[in-house]
Image (cartoon, rainbow, N blue to C red):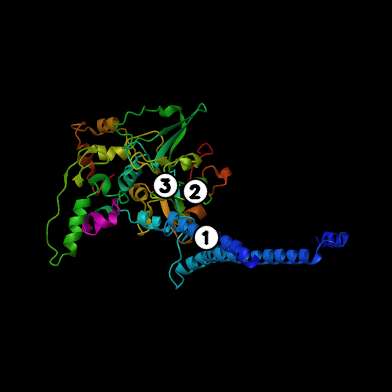
Amino acid sequence: MRLIRDLRHILIVLAVLVIGGAGGQFLRTAMIPESFGRQGPYRADALVTIASQKSRFPSAEKCHKCHEDVREEREETLHAGVACVHCHGLGEKHIAEAEAIAKSENAEGTVTPAEPWDGQFPSTIDLFISQDRKTCLVCHESVVGMPEDFRKIDVAAHLDEQGADDPDSPDTCFECHGNHDTAP
Amino acid sequence: MRQIDAKTGCDSDACSCDSTESDENTRRQFLRSARTVTLGAISLTVLPSTLASETTPSSNDAGEPENGKESTPLYGFLVDTSTCIGAGKCLTACRVENNVPEGQYRTWVERYIHFKDGRIQVDQVPESGYAGSDVEKVDEDLVERAYFVPKLCNHCEDAPCNQVCPTHASITSPEGVELVDPDLCIGCAYCVQACPYGVRFVNHETGNADKCTWCYHRIMREEQPACVEACPVDARVFGRLDDPESEINKRLATVPTHVLKEHLGTHPKLHYIGISKEVT
């Protein structure tokens, strides 16, 4: 009789432990995200998600794959380090088309040509050619804080000095300085 | 217990010593067996999880490339304020690359103007540069010295933002990059308050904590972060701290550099050239 009574107690304790353990294990798996703790105290899959984001800003090397002539034109100039994007836009559609053509069998096709610039940073136009002095002045207009040796200009004084025909024309800089092979 | 039992056994003859003893014995036996069962049950439930947690790190070690491949890189960032021209190209690049909402910044550029009379003015570079902006011109004759300071996440070794996250959404990646898990972040902004450099914010569009990731998606493809790619004067240098031949390590070894708020002991991996002590 005693043994049976004791056994009942032991069984109750066992049952509580087993049910509690199983419940705890269930909660654990249900509440801790998969891949948590695989690499550290975080969800390892999050790194994969974050790393899968699309790269948008194209490097100059990407553009130079096709535009080799521009690379040659620019490589000796002070503007060699200026990204193509600043004067031409992201060109996402343009690059995607070019890459599709490069992969295709006969490597033929046309890419969307550049449009005029809308004067915005960032621009909504995919690919543009900005023959606009604002593109130059965004870096070169003299501002307090620039390094001593950086080539900065006071536009009005400079144009007056050089005797510009039309000081307000967007083309002003390009008349004397060119674009890719910018003369100083 | 025994002494008392012996006493009770001898005090009264009428008392049945035998039954007391057998009672004691069964109770003792019961307690003994109960102890064994309890310990057994506890070890059964606890041991597997302990074993599991012990095996996890070792399996992680095995997961790292050991077969002659490159080890996990450790990245660092260097900003040369002596060349920054405040064109704001990095700001646009970051916004476009990471789809940051208008009015919020993962990176920004401050201008420090030290006037001759001892005053210091700090303002922020407009996103499309100073040309055509409505920023008031500063009289150059009054200025002692002035420079631009690009700011971004310091990716601290001991990141306070990471420590306070209640949902483990704040991640230090194996490459030493501080990231936010978009699925686990609840947007409580605790990390926003914890960051001593003010680089975190709650994204208006996603509702999550947002911050500079050093363009994690780009660097994992061996590309440069967008702001580095965009900088026309190479004021931003990004590279591997674990590679002695990298550009950043060569610069760090030859030029005096500073980190922001060094006294906080956060050990930032973002270094600066040419800043004065007023920059924080």
Does label 2 or label 3 sit earlier along the sequence?
2
| Residue kind at label 3, given as amino acid type | Cys
Under circle 3, the secondary element is: loop
> Is A179 contained in the magenta span?
no
Is residue A25 shown above or below B265? Answer: below
Mark 2 — on which chain does it sit?
A: B
Relative to B251, residue B210 above or below: above
> In this figure, which residue is indicated by the disc labeled 2?
B162
Q: Of helix, strand and loop, which one carries label 2?
A: helix
What chain is tagged by disc 3? B
Between disc 3 and disc 1, the foreground one is 1
- Residue highlighted by disc 3: B185
Please state the horizontal and vertical placement of residue A115, each as a whole percent of the image: 16, 44
Question: Is the residue marked by circle 2 packed among few (<14), some (14-19), or many (20+) residues within 10 Å?
Answer: many
Q: Which mark is residue A21?
A: 1
Q: Quadrant of the C terminus of chain A?
A: top left
Task: Report which quarter residue B263 is drawn in.
Answer: top right
Same chain under badges 2 and 3? The reply is yes
Q: Amino acid at mark 2?
A: Asn
Quadrant housing the N terminus of chain A: bottom right
